């Protein structure tokens, strides 16, 4: 299939293609691997990153030059399949009512990773606000909720646990003081330890996604209301269980729904 001949409009096609290429490379090689591959491609062809990830033929040529015979099976094949699926979804969704946009607040001290989150999730129809530390996250949360009235402006807040100035856990304390029902997702390289810290300091079951993770998995967690409902039940019933049992229950919920 020559996906460069897609009949979608140019801007929409380029946006979807860039999201798929970014997501596929990050899934395979992580955020730092993605940056390294892009730097190599930019150096080889002298074009900007955005030009490369919005031009399938150019990207494919560079992939084949870098990865050789593995390029088609490991990278290009999966990208083609995803583009085909998007085409089918667009056909089936044309007559569906428009869904309300989810509003997300994301805090992470790695600006390149933040930009990838924003690009990918906005491509999935989300409204995304990004900040670079926990303190700025709390300030933004307060500002938006003060301006909008009720303390439920953001549907989900995503916090990197390890940040300067104010950690994700410290930020979550401030946020939950404003809105105890706020849905929060922690991003952490240490799943079980973070769950223990959250239960000990917040006395609340909160979703944690373990690094490194797929952007598709993050999007699925954001959209899966059942995860948050089950975590809320664990919080309500938490006095009946020990910390280790609650950690086990939370991990079961996350494993079964991701």
Image (tube, helix red, strand yellow):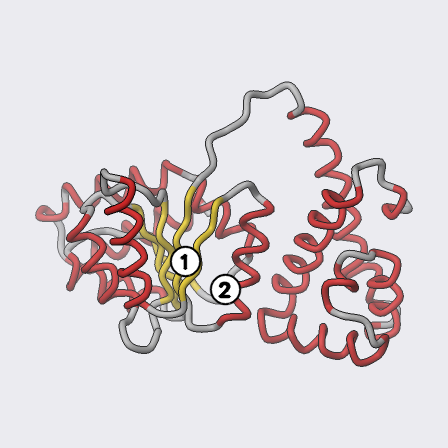
Q: Is residue 14 above or below residue 70?
A: above
Q: Residue at x 50, y 70 (%)?
A: 111
Q: Residue furthest front?
A: 147
Taking the image as shown, residue 187 lies to the left or right of residue 63, namely left
Residue 73, position in %: x, y? 81, 59
**Number of residue marks:** 2
Q: Locate residue 105, reporting x and y percent.
A: 39, 53
Q: Secondary structure at mark 1?
A: strand
Quadrant location of the N terminus in the rendered image: top right
**Residue located at (28% from left, 53% from top):** 143
Give the mark nearest the N terminus, 2 or 1.
1
Query: In the image, which disc is placed on residue 206?
Result: none
Q: Determine the residue located farthest toward the top in the rendered image.
A: 95
Mark 2 residue crowding within 10 angstroms, few (<14) / some (14–19) / many (20+): some
Relative height, residue 249 to residue 89 (above, below): below
Q: Which residue corresponds to the image point at 88% horizontal and 73% vertical from the top-left?
A: 65
Q: Which mark is residue 114?
A: 2
- The answer for how far apart the CA atoms under marks 2 and 1 are is 8 Å
Give the farthest residue toward the left.
239
Helix, strand or loop at mark 2: helix
- The residue at which mark 1 appears reads as 106
CB atoms at circles 2 and 1 under 8 Å apart?
yes
**Image point (57%, 61%), residue name:** 116
Q: Position of residue 35 (x, y in %)?
A: 64, 74
Q: Mark 1, residues whose alpha carbon is within 10 Å: few (<14), some, or many (≥20)? A: many
Image side of residue 106 versus residue 22, left or right: left
Tell me which corner region of the image, top left, top right, bottom left or bottom right, holds residue 53. Answer: bottom right
In the displayed structure, does residue 252 sit left or right of residue 112? Answer: left
Decide if residue 77 is on the left or right side of residue 166: right
Question: Which of the pair 103/89 is nearer the observer?
Answer: 103
The foreground one among 79 and 195 is 79
């Amino acid at each position: 299939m020559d996906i460069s001949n897609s009949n979608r409009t140019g801007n929409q096609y380029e946006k979807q293609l860039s999201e798929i290429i970014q997501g596929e490379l990050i899934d395979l090689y992580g955020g730092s691997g993605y940056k390294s591959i892009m730097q190599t491609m930019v150096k080889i062809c002298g074009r900007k990153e955005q030009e490369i990830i919005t031009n399938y033929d150019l990207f494919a040529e560079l992939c084949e030059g870098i990865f050789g015979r593995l390029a088609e099976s490991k990278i290009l094949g999966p990208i083609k399949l995803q583009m085909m699926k998007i085409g089918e979804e667009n056909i089936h969704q044309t007559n569906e009512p428009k869904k309300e946009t989810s509003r997300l607040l994301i805090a992470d001290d790695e600006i390149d990773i933040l930009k990838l989150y924003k690009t990918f999730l906005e491509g999935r129809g989300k409204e995304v606000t990004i900040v670079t530390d926990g303190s700025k996250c709390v300030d933004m949360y307060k500002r938006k909720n003060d301006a909008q009235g009720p303390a439920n402006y953001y549907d989900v807040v995503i916090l990197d646990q390890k940040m300067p100035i104010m950690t994700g856990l410290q930020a979550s304390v401030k946020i939950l003081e404003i809105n105890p029902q706020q849905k929060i997702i922690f991003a952490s390289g240490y799943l079980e330890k973070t769950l223990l810290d959250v239960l000990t300091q917040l006395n609340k079951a909160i979703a944690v996604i373990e690094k490194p993770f797929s952007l598709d998995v993050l999007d699925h967690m954001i959209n899966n209301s059942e995860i948050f409902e089950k975590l809320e039940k664990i919080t309500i019933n938490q006095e009946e269980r020990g910390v280790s049992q609650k950690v086990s229950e939370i991990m079961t919920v996350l494993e079964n729904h991701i």
